[in-house]
Amino acid sequence: MVLIKANRVARYVQKPDPQVKACLLFGSDAGLIREHGATLCESMRSLLPDNPELVRLNEDDLAADPDRLAVEAQTISMFSPSKVLRARVSGRTVNELAKFPWGQLPDSVRVVIEVGNLKPDIKLRKLFEGGETLAALACYESSDTASLSQLVRQEISRASLTITRDAERHLTNLLGADPGIAKAEIAKLITYAQDTGEISVEDVDAVVGDASDATLNVAVHEILTGDSASALTQMEKLRASGTPPDVLLSALSRQLMQLISVRARMDAGRSADSAINAIRPPLHFRRKDEIKLQIRRWDRGHLKRALGRVSRALQYTRTHPEIAHQVAGDTIFQLARTLGKTPR
């Protein structure tokens, strides 16, 4: 894996790579690290089946017992076969964590490590930047981001509106560095939300949301509801916009993991609405409706086999980029054929 730079971290923690088992969050902004860490833990929980347990560890826990992280990673919980470990550490245990066998983490476990500033030559940081199933996330608020945040607050206040903290952060991640273009996008958002009083994340997505993200979501939904022809059309739009096919397969993999978790709750006796409402972080009502349509078409066995097929395709596209589009297209057709054999 590579270093996730500061301007991409907010988006990554919302949609982490399902192949990544452990993430290291580091930087000078402790508040930002905590916020991103909390979001990432919930996003990782949504990728694992059977309502995974969240285990919190701190510096004192690891200093008192250097093997604590390894024991937690290998121990099956009484409440769920999967878990997410969240550890906040400082300089005392950084060197010990570099000795941890990160390549041997079980598939049912995800780990989030939160630490302070780390120089590029620190062994733990180098390990996470280069590990196949690891990711290093740089948590710094750049001067550009700070300026954009100030511009957002200024323009929205001038229009006698307010904006939620999550919406403000989401908006600054979507806006470009050009102040003129940013002002134009903010003006459109203000016009759209003029009668609401407060701007939400949903408002930002409706007006300023990344077009490629919208196309990606449409493609995944159409694949999982059996409309392979429309899905391939969306895939061509993504290709034209420069989006690599492995991005589509990664999004598809995340959604399949989420559906497996929902289906497991339903198989345990919960209603579809109850199972979907248990997803964390909570979904917008439009996303809930989409998942309800998708889950009707799949049982857990078919979902797991589909996830295996997509995971293999994802790995192949990364090692054979010259035929990545063909592999992704073939995978979509295979899923459509599987869906055709699944009870409705």
Image: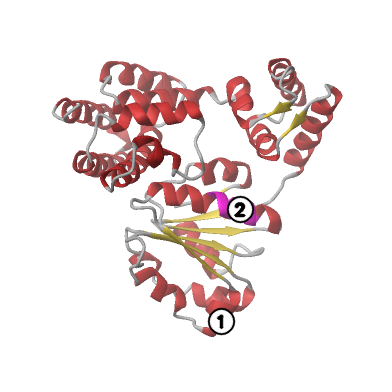
User: Disc 2 residue type?
Assistant: Ala
Residue 289 is one of the magenta-drawn residues: no
Numbered disc 2: secondary structure: strand
Q: Which residues are magenta?
A: 33-39
Left or right: where 183 falls relative to 269 = right
Identify the mark nearer the N-term, 1 or 2. Answer: 1
| Residue picked out by circle 2 | 138
| Residue picked out by circle 1 | 63
Image coordinates for residue 288, horizontal then vertical, percent: 43, 31
Q: Residue at x 71, y 47 (%)?
A: 141
Residue 37 is one of the magenta-drawn residues: yes
Q: Is residue 62 above or below residue 302?
A: below
Left or right: where 123 falls relative to 53 = right
Image coordinates for residue 171, horizontal then vertical, percent: 66, 32
Q: Is residue 4 above or below residue 230?
A: below
User: Disc 1 residue type?
Assistant: Ala
